[in-house]
Image (spheres, rainbow, N blue to C red):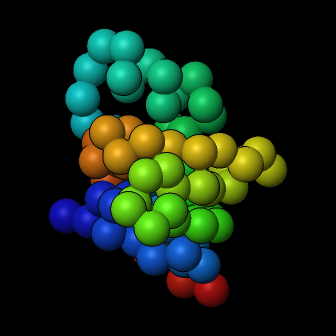
Amino acid sequence: MQTLKDVKPGQKVKVVKLYGHGPMKKRIMDMGITVDSELFIRKVAPLGDPIEVNVRGYELSLRKSDIDIIEVEEVAG
């Protein structure tokens, strides 16, 4: 299993599963990150918090606690 925290800047990944429940999962989904969404990792702060991603044409910053619940797989190309 690979989560978003394992992805390096410049990689493109696809969301496979969202873990967690309640407000944390709802906040992620409200940002437009759902299963099958493609994310491009723009930048990761030196300590890993925040991570900046592009999703559906929007730039987002995610916290460490958010990226731990997002399971991804690498997208070819």
Task: Report the residue that reaches farthest toward the left.
Answer: 1
Q: In the shown orientation, is residue 65 left or right of residue 55?
A: left
Whether residue 53 is situated above or below residue 21 in the rendered picture: below
Whether residue 55 is situated above or below residue 11 in the rendered picture: above
Foreground pick, 14 / 41: 41
Foreground pick, 60 / 22: 60
Q: Position of residue 41 (x, y in %)?
A: 58, 66
Measuring 64% from the left and 67% from the top, which residue is drawn there?
42
Task: Report the residue that reaches farthest toward the top.
Answer: 22
Q: Looking at the image, can residue 72 be seen?
A: no
Measuring 43% from the left and 42% from the top, which residue is drawn there?
63
* Quarter of image, res 76: bottom right
Which quadrant would the N terminus be assigned to in this image?
A: bottom left
Measuring 68% from the left and 55% from the top, which residue is drawn there?
54
Which quadrant would the C terminus be assigned to in this image?
A: bottom right
Q: Position of residue 72 (x, y in %)?
A: 38, 60
Q: Looking at the image, can residue 46 be seen?
A: yes
